[in-house]
Image (cartoon, rainbow, N blue to C red):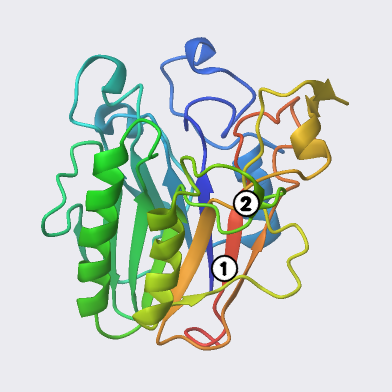
């Protein structure tokens, strides 16, 4: 079994095709040949695709389709710059043959007004897809998110997969001990990673993943059509798979997705991460 997590930085812009959001027509949006989603499907045929920062309301999501998959979207309920088609949001595309028992979009105690959480209960396991708040603009919300999520995850039984853009960086291209704490590397954020391990979650990153990082700053100068940071792999690790009661699973970063097709990097400043689960479906 294979699962993708990816912060797409807007699902309606250069993820399914080469068009920015304002250039899309009103017809259904499906993966065009060699688009980022098409490459993921061809290379891995994932059973689930967990997306973050979709910036897509539920109404518009009805036109976004992948053949052989169902989908579920969660949207921001706020207005203005934080409205559903402009901010946050999560989605899961899942193969039609999967037995989904229930889907929820909240955890106790956390005011999830920005569509940041999808919990999908399947027959074989539970998967939690999240777009965690950024401490730079949502400092108090991030602390609340961490506390409520830890409490929720600790109570889950059976096989559990916790994935998404955590907006914490346990790995960076620079030495964190030489810089002042800042969003993504605040002590309470790095401690969240350690606390997950304390409640029996395991970081699924493969020892063979030499890329490690999953986000690169696009604001830096360009080099061969991409930012210097992405070209030289000077990034941050923000996107994760954590697993509980699952053996032999491993994740790797798919940095090449979006780098050499349709003039995209760039669809997104994040790269997809792939989790392979040989234990659940041998």
Label 2, label 1: how many angstroms apart (C-alpha)?
27 Å
| Other residues around mark 1 within 10 Å, as few (<14) / some (14–19) / many (≥20) | many
Up the image or down, 244 lies above or below 78; here it is below
Up the image or down, 241 lies above or below 139; here it is below
Q: Secondary structure at mark 1?
A: strand
Q: Are marks 2 and 1 in contact (CB under 8 Å)?
A: no
Q: Is residue 116 visible?
A: no
Q: Exactly how many numbered labels are in the figure?
A: 2
Q: Residue furthest left?
A: 109
Residue of label 1: 275
At horizontal 34% and vertical 80% (from top left) the residue drawn is 199
Q: Position of residue 202 (x, y in %)?
A: 48, 78
Up the image or down, 261 lies above or below 176; here it is above
Q: Position of residue 161 (x, y in %)?
A: 40, 71
Residue of label 2: 176
**Which numbered mark, 2 or 1, is in the foreground of this view?**
2
């Amino acid at each position: 079994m294979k699962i993708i997590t990816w912060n797409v930085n807007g699902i309606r812009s250069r993820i399914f095709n080469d068009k920015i959001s304002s250039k899309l027509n009103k017809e259904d949006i499906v993966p065009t040949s060699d688009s980022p989603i098409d490459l993921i499907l061809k290379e891995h045929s994932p059973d689930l695709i967990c997306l973050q920062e979709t910036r897509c309301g539920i109404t518009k999501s009805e036109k976004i389709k992948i053949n052989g998959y169902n989908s579920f979207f969660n949207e921001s309920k706020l207005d203005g710059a934080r409205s559903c088609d402009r901010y946050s949001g999560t989605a899961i595309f899942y193969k039609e043959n999967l037995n989904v028992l229930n889907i929820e979009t909240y955890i106790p105690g956390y005011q999830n007004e920005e569509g940041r959480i999808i919990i999908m209960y399947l027959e074989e396991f539970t998967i939690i897809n999240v777009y965690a708040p950024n401490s730079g603009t949502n400092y108090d919300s991030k602390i609340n998110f961490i506390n409520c999520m830890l409490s929720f995850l600790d109570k889950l039984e059976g096989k559990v997969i916790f994935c998404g853009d955590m907006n914490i960086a346990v790995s960076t291209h620079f030495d964190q001990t030489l810089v002042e704490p800042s969003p993504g590397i605040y002590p309470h954020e790095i401690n969240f990673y350690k606390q997950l391990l304390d409640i029996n979650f395991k970081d699924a990153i493969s020892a063979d993943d030499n890329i490690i990082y999953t986000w690169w700053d696009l604001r830096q100068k360009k080099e061969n059509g991409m930012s210097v940071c992405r070209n030289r792999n000077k990034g941050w690790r923000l996107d994760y798979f954590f697993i509980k009661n699952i053996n032999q699973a491993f994740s790797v970063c798919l940095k090449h997705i979006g780098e050499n097709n349709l003039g995209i990097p760039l669809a997104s400043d994040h790269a997809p991460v792939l989790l392979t689960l040989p234990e659940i479906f041998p």
